[in-house]
Amino acid sequence: MPKLFAHLEHFLVDPIPRFHYLAYRTGFLLKCALPRYRAAWPGAVAFFPDATVDFPSELTPKFCTGDLMRRRTCLRRSAKSRSQIGVQHIEELEGRMLLAGNGLSAVYYNSTNLTGSNVSRTDATVNFNWKGAKPASTIAGDQFSARWTGQIQPNYSQTYTFSTVSDDGVRLWVNGSLIINQWNRHAAREDKGTITLQAGHKYSIKMEYFQSYGGSVAQLWWASASQAKQIVPQAQLYSTATTPPSSIPPTQVPTTPSVTGSLRISSNGRYLMRANGTPFFYLADTAWQMPIKLDRADVDYYLKDRAAKGFTAIQMVALDTPSDKNRYGQQALLNNNPATPNQAFFQQIDYIVSKAASLGLYISFMPTWGRNVGETGGRMFNTSNAYAYGKYLGNRYRNAWNIIWINGGDTAVNNATAANIWRSLAQGLNDGDGGAHLITFHPLGGRTARTYWANQSWLDFDMLQSGHTRDSAAWNMVTTDYNKGPVMPVIEGEANYEDIPTGAFSGNLNTPLLDAYDVRKKAYWETFAGAAGTAYGANEVFQFWNPGQPADIGAHVPWKTALNLPGATQVKYLRGLMESRVYFNRVPDQSLVVSATYSGTDHIQATRDAGGAYAMVYSASGKAFTVNMSKITGGAVNAAWYDPRTGKVTPIGKFANTGTRTFTPPTHGYGQDWVLTLDRA
């Protein structure tokens, strides 16, 4: 086989699971482009069947050579040598096995004593924080238990410290020895046990867990002198029905992963959740023009950045201006007809959807911008070609697990013709994908989807556009639709774009720019008012502006620079806060605050757990407020301040859970927003 790579620059980090990785002691993570296998232990080690590789002399990687399916000899190349593997200056290290674990066999029971009705599956690792959600579709979120069994294979001949983090009870056996035994109700805690193991040997392992009420955490960690503490990885775990390595076929990336899959609506109708019942907080970045403006290299750059910053979804539109061509010279439609989409154009969108999936991102997919339907002068859709276009898209992405459909597109529905076209497009999407994906509607600014669609079977969740206005009462928009029937999630689809002039949509670009504070205020106000998520946007990013292009809406910095605007890194702290507590029981409750809640920049918004486990109050400018403490159950509460700018938690103290209490944030004034968290002690 010829040399795989000649220089370090050729090794690019790539998160797609089917690729194989190489890690250096220097800390670099490098891709070796050999499908099927990955480095399987810290160090980290690369596997080459018969390949030769030339590396920069200043690095000292470790390698494993030989038949990939048998025991290998690990070698370290001399730093002074640029020789090919197996030629000279090679020092033999201890033998290792290529680890190809598949996880542990898991059985979940609808009881706390490991009996009764159950569900069986294979779990890649034991690393769960259900936060009140169901561990499986037929298993309740409380009063359940689980047992994981199989084998574990260590990398080193050393004494291992196993740790469990659990809420509630846990027991752990390794090689038949009970090393952790905390079979009782307790809050999340870490327990440890030690055992000496031999490298390459497989040992029996069994972990049992039960959940009573409240928090639900089950994690299995290990560490040794050479093994950094980590969740025990899939590579070292084998279920009792492990397929022999020699018969494992080439890895195929599944189109519908069992752990994530297409999104669903929670049982109470208020939130989004993944296929396995875990919460999905909608934290979207806005990239409307990505299909037109970016080539594949820039798609990779953008999506990796957004995944790293904690976004969960990306909003984009396929058909904006019909005459637009993408970076490869293709228009979305043939003959300007929605009934004849251009296959070559949608190959680029295929790539975007696939790349996003590899990073765990959902694509909030808008088929067309509203002007192409709602404006009579530019209308190119009718009910027939709208249905055909929708069915084409639905069928094309039927098996893509990471799709959310956004009907509409910054548009009013002010006549029957437009309404019928949007209905036909939605019907086409549903018929094309068999109802596999959720559908919402993106309305004109200052409106919500249910401004136009009161009772539509195709509308799975409500979307609002509060618009790009500083300190508008967006919480009222959420509250109004939250209280409408039928119950459905409410999500902000377009709020304050960071770095956009405050007067942009009144024709005045010479006005102050909306900033991270403007982003945070709306996001927290709306989420605490009951929203199931929010969309972030940056002026230069949604249009992917670069110098030399027309500066639309006051764009003034390159989009790659704008990726790092402060708001883009701060919105993840909202997601983190929401996911840190019991998720699906959260309700808005302004009666928590018995003092003034103000309007504008000073507005205070409150939310709590319906079961009384916690409460949160957002003070947008750090004004003091008084809380009705009886909203939280139990005799006492733990109070803390949460900083929306940094995600830092500062404990305040433990207080009696009676009467009222006034809280004063650490700082106040413009840009000094704080969240008070109150948790049942």
Image (cartoon, rainbow, N blue to C red):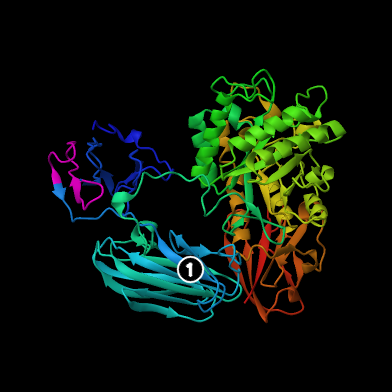
Q: Residue at x 64, y 45 (%)?
A: 437
Q: Residue at x 76, y 41 (%)?
A: 467
Residue that label 1 marks:
107
Counting labels gives 1
Inspect the magenta stretch and tell me whether residue 415 lies in it. Answer: no
Kind of residue at badge 1: Val
Q: Position of residue 42 (x, y in %)?
A: 32, 55
Left or right: where 387 falls relative to 227: right
The one nearer the camera, 79 or 450, is: 450
Q: Position of residue 446 (x, y in %)?
A: 81, 42
Q: Position of residue 80 (x, y in %)?
A: 17, 40
Does residue 391 appear in the picture of this structure?
yes
The magenta segment is 67-90
Does residue 288 appear in the picture of this structure?
no
Q: Is residue 660 above or below residue 273?
A: below
Q: Residue at x 45, y 64 (%)?
A: 126
Q: Position of residue 603 (x, y in %)?
A: 78, 56
